[in-house]
Amino acid sequence: MTIKQEAMRVAILAHNQVALFELGCATELFCLSRPETEELYSGEVVTFAEAAPATSGGLALQCRQVNSLMEFDLLVIPNWPTVLLPRDTYVARVHRAVTEFAAAGRQILTFCSGAFLPAELGLLAGREATTHWRYAESFRQRFPSVEYVGDVLYVWHDQLACAAGSSAAIDLGIEFLRRTYGFELANAIARRLVMAPHRQGGQAQFIEAPVAKRPDYFASALDWALANLQESFTVDVWANQAHLSRRSFDRKFRQSMGTSPKEWLIQQRLRVVQKSLESGELTVDGAAHMAGFESSTTLRHHFRRTFGISPSQYRRQFSGGAGPSVDSN
């Protein structure tokens, strides 16, 4: 008999002047009902304020007032004031509830300036953290015991993870879903959100990139490349598929995709390898061959450069060590 696991409950903290973009990212990820997620988790926007929180643009949020967060499994803090608030009854309730939640070992995600709240509570002392670059200097001055990290999409440290400004919130949310529910669900959500092909940053992402369909030869060439990743073709051959000269193809590719054709191919092949390694069905050598890398040595070089670990380490970490044996590199 299979015991059905209870769905995870997600609290999204709202307060006066909560940032609508980051709040929208949180609700899009954790509140929008989707067939893939309806039995896995559900989200709710909550507040400790007695009156409806007023947001930017004069909007007011109708959300449930709570006195505790302990009915939830995950807390998302879209943002928080970057100046020290007077410790009134409201702030005291928030501080007490978040401290209790953290002490219970439950997961907290902060977006943008949301990192200021756990930092105020001492939860980030001695740890790395990040926030929007606009608040970097203020964050450093107020919290010298926290090691601020810039030029990253997010920082993950056990039960506390911080995303940098704005759209990095989605990157962190997708990474949480991947760590919690696996690669396939994270990919499905990323495709629905039309994620960028590859988010550059200090934290390597684990997202399969969708490609927008366009009625032209260039888009057809992208589809052709994805369908033939296992083959060892040159960029010149690829440019011919787009009915473009090599120079024109390189220029259009950078303008459209934000990277070079060669680097894009490497990243797509790495995603094929990731999926294969997570399934545990192939060795590193087998995955390299299937994805079209010249050799497993070439794969290891690009894999470590992109993700910071070797293919074998990744396989052990995300497949549970199942499947055929692999090398130790």
Image (spheres, rainbow, N blue to C red):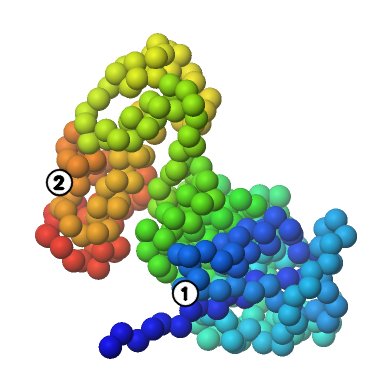
**Where residue 277 sits in the image (x, y, percent)?**
24, 55
Front in this rendered view, residue 104 or 121: 104
Question: In the figure, 281 relative to 196: above or below?
Answer: below
Residue assigned mark 1: 39
Q: Is residue 147 visible?
A: no
Secondary-structure class at tag 2: helix
The quadrant in which residue 44 appears is bottom right
Image location (x, y in percent) of residue 244: 41, 13
Looking at the image, residue 119 sits to the left or right of residue 17; the answer is: left
The residue depicted at 50 percent of the width and 82 percent of the height is 105
> Which residue type carries mark 1?
Glu
Q: Residue furthest right?
A: 58
Amino acid tagged 2? Asp
Could you say whether the residue bearing mark 1 is in a helix, strand or loop? loop
Mark number, residue 252: none
Image height check: is 59 above or below 221? below
* Residue found 18% across the figure and 57% down from its top: 281
Residue at image location 56% in from the left, 62% down from the top = 29
- Relative horizontal placement of residue 179, taking residue 71 as reference (left or right): left
Q: Quadrant of the N terminus?
A: bottom left
- Mark 2 sits on what residue? 285
Residue 177 vertical position relative to residue 71 in the rendered view, above or below: above
Q: CA distance from mark 2 to mark 1?
A: 37 Å
- Residue closer to the observer: 28 or 168: 28
Q: Position of residue 172 (x, y in %)?
A: 52, 59
